[in-house]
Amino acid sequence: MTDPTRARTGIPALTPRRFPVTREANEAPAAPREVVFALAGVSVYYGGFQAVRDASFEVASHEITALIGPSGCGKSTLLRTLNRMNDLIPGARVEGAVAYQGENIYDPDIDPVEVRRRIGMVFQKPNPFPKSIYDNVAFGPRLHGVRGPALDDVVERALRGAALWDEVRGKLKQSGLSLSGGQQQRLCIARTIAVDPEVVLMDEPCSALDPIATARIEDLMQEIKHDYTIVIVTHNMQQAARISDRTAFFTTEVNPDTDSRTGLLVEFDDTSRIFANPSDERTENYVTGRFG
Ligand SMILES: Nc1ncnc2c1ncn2[C@@H]1O[C@H](COP(=O)(O)OP(=O)(O)O)[C@@H](O)[C@H]1O
Ligand SMILES: [Mg+2]
């Protein structure tokens, strides 16, 4: 990518690994794709409670990967394992391997702050800081020492990248909280991309937005996936079908001894296949609305 922001912030890009994906014999050979995340046997616990059991799948570069499934199946939990946000929850514990660009991000010598810079996150409810529009976007770059005209450039670039520049260019000093919900969410996306991440994680980013604002965010995701890799949690199956390239479907299974529910990955595949021709009956029941 030829983004001058990366050069300006002086943060080195990693070299992704390339290897081919296994395909069924009757399918056309796929072009090699870059594996950004490889999860192997990932389980997540909150204290003694197991929220996710033994999830394994891969996230490819410059794709949108959707995590779907019923409430409580561990989608948000798993998303947070991708940038070590679960570290911030007391009692949370991750087992298994989460390789990012081939490195286990849970290795003791990995800096979680750097992990979160490379792997940004956008939340369900837009959460701008009670600061100006400019200062919201400038927050992260300032922490990295960007100052002066270079900072103005980074802010403009991020706001353009989040399709918000034209709406706010004349009022950068106004509070971020004065914007509409949809604009606030695009401001949060601008704030996230301003530190030049490689991955953007999104946890139900449209669930607090009206349909028009949702459509704008969906369009924006299609645009920015050329620059970033996106993993999105959505409870909206139509959204997953519309925007994602690959989909992971999770469900919960009841543990009869404790009557608790643990999330597990049922099926991971091309989105078109998950919705048109899933291989697991549980996926079929869910995507056709027959989930019981
Ligand atoms: N901070 C937490 N502490 C304890 N349990 C949690 C915490 N966050 C989530 N859980 C539990 O983990 C399970 C998965 O939750 P979550 O990842 O939020 O599911 P989803 O996003 O699919 O709705 C649920 O049973 C939930 O109650
Ligand atoms: Mg959730």
Image (cartoon, rainbow, N blue to C red):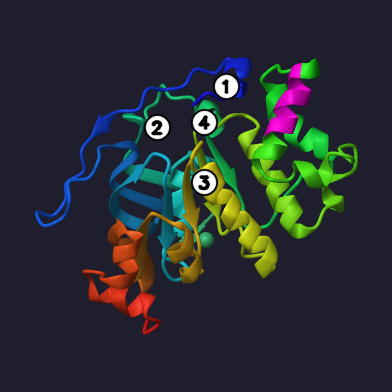
Q: Residues within 10 Å of mark 4 (few under 14, many from 20)?
A: many
The percent position of residue 158, horizontal first and vertical second, equals 68, 35
Is-magenta flag for residue 155? yes
What's the residue type where badge 3 is placed?
Leu
What's the residue type where badge 1 is placed?
Arg
Mark 4, residue position:
118
Q: Secondary structure at mark 4?
A: helix
The disc, 3 or 1, on the residue closer to the chain's N-terminal end is: 1
Is-magenta flag for residue 182? no
**With respect to residue 3, does 251 lie above or below?**
below
Mark sitting on residue 67: none
Residue 58 falls in which quadrant of the image?
A: top left
Q: Which residues are magenta?
A: 150-157
Q: Residues within 10 Å of mark 3 (few under 14, many from 20)?
A: many
The disc, 2 or 3, on the residue closer to the chain's N-terminal end is: 2
User: Which of 201 and 19 lies nearest the eye of the viewer?
Assistant: 19
Mark 2, residue position:
105
Mark 3, residue position:
201
Mark sitting on residue 6: 1
Going by the picture, which residue comes out furthest to the front? Answer: 28
The percent position of residue 26, horizontal first and vertical second, equals 11, 57
The disc, 2 or 1, on the residue closer to the chain's N-terminal end is: 1
Asked if the residue under mark 3 is in contact with the one under mark 4, i.e. CB atoms within 8 Å, the reply is: no
Mark 4 within 8 Å of ligand 1, using the beta carbon: no
Residue 285 falls in which quadrant of the image?
A: bottom left
- Identify the main secondary structure in magenta: helix
